[in-house]
Image: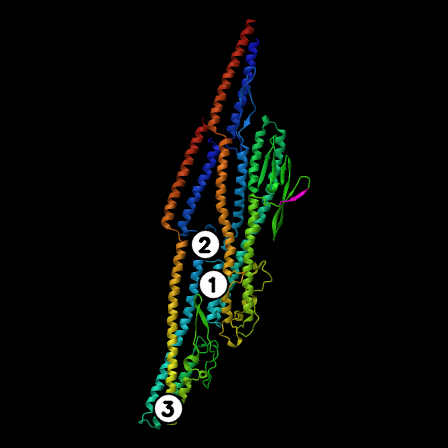
Amino acid sequence: MDSIKSLMGGAANAIGAHKASLALTSKNIANANTEGYTRQRITLMSSTLGNVTTRRASSFRSATIQRAILGAQQSYGYQSGRLQSLQLAEPGLNDLDGSGVSAALDNFFSALSALSNDPSDVNSRQSLLAQAQALAGAVNVAAKGIESARNAAEQDASLTVTAVNQIVLDIAALNGQIDKTPVEMGQAELIDQRDVLLNDLAQYMEVNTLDQDDGTVLVYAAGGQPLILGDDASQMTLTGGGNAALGLAIQKPDGGVITMSDPPGGSLGGIIEARDDTLRTSLDELDQMAFSLASQVNTIHSAGTALDGTTGHNFFAPLATAAGAAEALSVDDGIKSDPLLIASAGDPTLLPGDNQVLKDIIALQSTAVVGGKTLYESYDIASSTVTLAMNDASSQMRASQARLSEVTAMRDSRSAVSIAEEMVELNASERAFDAVSRVFDTADKLYDTLLQMV
Amino acid sequence: MRVTEALVYNRMGRNNTLSRQRLDKTSLQLMTGRSIERPSDDPLLASRIEQANRGMRRTDRFRENIAQTDTHYRNLESTVATVVDQLSELSELAISMVSGAMNADNKSYAAEQVTNILQSMRALGNMKYDGKYIFSGRLETTPAYDDLGNYQGDAIGRTTEVTDGYSIQTDMSGLEVFGDPGAGATTAFQAAENLRTGLLANDNTQILAALDELQAAHKTATGAWSVIGYRLSELQQYDGINDDQKINYAEQEADLVGADYAKAASEMQFAETVYQASLATSSRLMEILKMEARL
């Protein structure tokens, strides 16, 4: 009887073990397409009593691959954020279709040249006025494009910080649950969910993680600032904005605030770099160009004499400083209302045919008037600052994307579910379950037989 | 390497996207005929294209300057040619009047002819084109000569740029055509006036002196005519140079911007094939995955 009892007990144990194995296999199959799911496997081993027992389920998770994914995500995110932030500025700096600042500068100097051949010709004056307005308009558009890109980048950064804060809270909450959840009660699934959130976070900013023995993870931002310690989450705030550079501050759970001095990395880092470095540099150069154009032309023009013998007229509306000059550049209202006030003569006694003032303005095109650069060179720097950065970001993004795909493939290969494998496992577990069920049935029949004998 | 569903799907998605992007890029080149659409596609190439465009715009400006100046000089040329003819006529009249056969009445009649020619010459001296006096230099709204034949225009005219770093004078002052008293010459008007005086006085000595002055004036006017001819020739020469330069810039721009159609077509065909293969492979893989699920 005892041997029948132990037979039944062993069979019951084995049924439990295979049932658990079946359950885990079916869970694997059910989650074959679940993002971030790490397959699990139950290891069966024989006990000292000769029965089969299950070892706890193990998860095919690799911390090394996970860290590599985080690194690739933040690199891709950085270039992606950078490229996206720069794209809005490019249309205003595009001269390929002949409608940009470069062509407008050429047309302005051509109109000056045409007028210099016949300074009293009204049509030529009207044409010069039109080309000057077109030049101012092209510079305005270029500047507004860059400024719009900077504003959009600031908004993106704000939205990204909001998203980061939510993710950080979610990860901290998961850490709290992971800490309280035993392995056999679904801790692995919580870790998977947390890893998915960490991937998302890494795309937004650089994060460094430290896995703990209890399954939780410590998360640090660039520069070693703590973001998540256990279930405690810090929150980030965006500082600066407008004309000031953007910055980040971390508010710790205890209320303390740390200013992040290191670039945050990820898309946030790319956005901030694009806004406060590339676009800022481009806009500053464009402002310098516009300011020098207006100042130099006005200096020459105001010393010249208009057709009515008057002097002291500005050609462009005067600009006080270089800051904002590109967006503010415009033709003087006096000239707009009366093109005859365009000064052409250097010597008032030689009116109306003297063209010295016009020739002096034309000479500006090949003179270094913008910090050792010509107007054209200055504009080229303003536009190429953006286009070169975009080209670089695009190229690096492709490389980062390839790297991300590679490490993701490594993760998918190691940790994801293969339905074919699970089907084989399912089949094996099912057969084993059937076999053990028969043993149980047989033991049960033996028991019945014995009882009848009694 | 374990092949899992996630691995297969992720790879399918990425490779389909990559081959689709490649197809899109090559088809765009064929549709637009351009090798790049935006400066960021290739900033260095975009910079070279812009340099070529600037070169074209610059040559266009020079050619416009040349055209304006050419028109002006052609007006000058026809006027100066007439002045030269008038001075020739006056010289011939003077020669014919100093022969012994001519009496006072003949000379009086000749004096009337000189008056008419002189009036016409003065009118040419104050010729206008497009509302501006053509011999006044920069003082183009002031008549070049007053009623007494004194020059009141500007001695130094304007210049215009006809190629990089080279400018040409765009006009000619009356002093260059009719003579510069400041340089010790007798003006054409004065020479004609002196001839008229000599004829009315029936004085062959005065007539001969006036003849010398007329011949000197003729030489001055002919010299001005030659200068105009030379400048027109120079303008034509620089126009040709600018035209050639523009063609060079245009060819350069076309080479840089224009897509190599044969290459783009071949690349597009390859990209299309790759994309179709990628889609077909994805389709087969998904069938296999379905089969696995039915196991």
| Furthest residue in direction top, as rendered | A454
Whole-percent x, y for residue B223 in the image: 38, 79
**How busy is the neighbourhood of tag 3: few (under 14 within 10 Å), some, or many (20 plus)?**
many
Residue A360 seen in this snapshot: yes
Whole-percent x, y for residue A202 in the image: 56, 40
Residue B207: image tag: 3
Are callouts 1 and 2 both on one chain? no
Q: In which quarter of the image is residue A97?
A: bottom left
In the displayed structure, B39 sits above or below B275; it is below
The residue lying toward the viewer, choosing from A42 and A331, is A42
Q: Specify the subunit that label 1 lies on.
A: A
Secondary structure at numbered mark 2: helix
**How busy is the neighbourhood of tag 2: few (under 14 within 10 Å), some, or many (20 plus)?**
many
In the displayed structure, B87 sits above or below A193; it is below
Which residue in the structure is indicated by mark 1? A107
Q: How is the image coloured?
A: rainbow
Q: Quadrant of residue A173?
A: top right
- Does residue A392 show up magenta in the picture? no
Whole-percent x, y for residue A389 in the image: 51, 50
Tag in front: 1 or 3: 3
Precedes in sequence: disc 3 or disc 2: 2
Residue A330 seen in this snapshot: no
Which residue in the structure is indicated by mark 2? B46
In the displayed structure, A156 sits above or below A215; it is below
Q: Specify the subunit that label 2 lies on.
A: B
Confirm or deny contact between disc 3 and disc 2 (CB under 8 A): no
Q: What stretch is highlighted in magenta?
A: A256-260
Q: Main secondary structure of the magenta part?
A: strand
The residue type indicated by label 3 comes to Ile
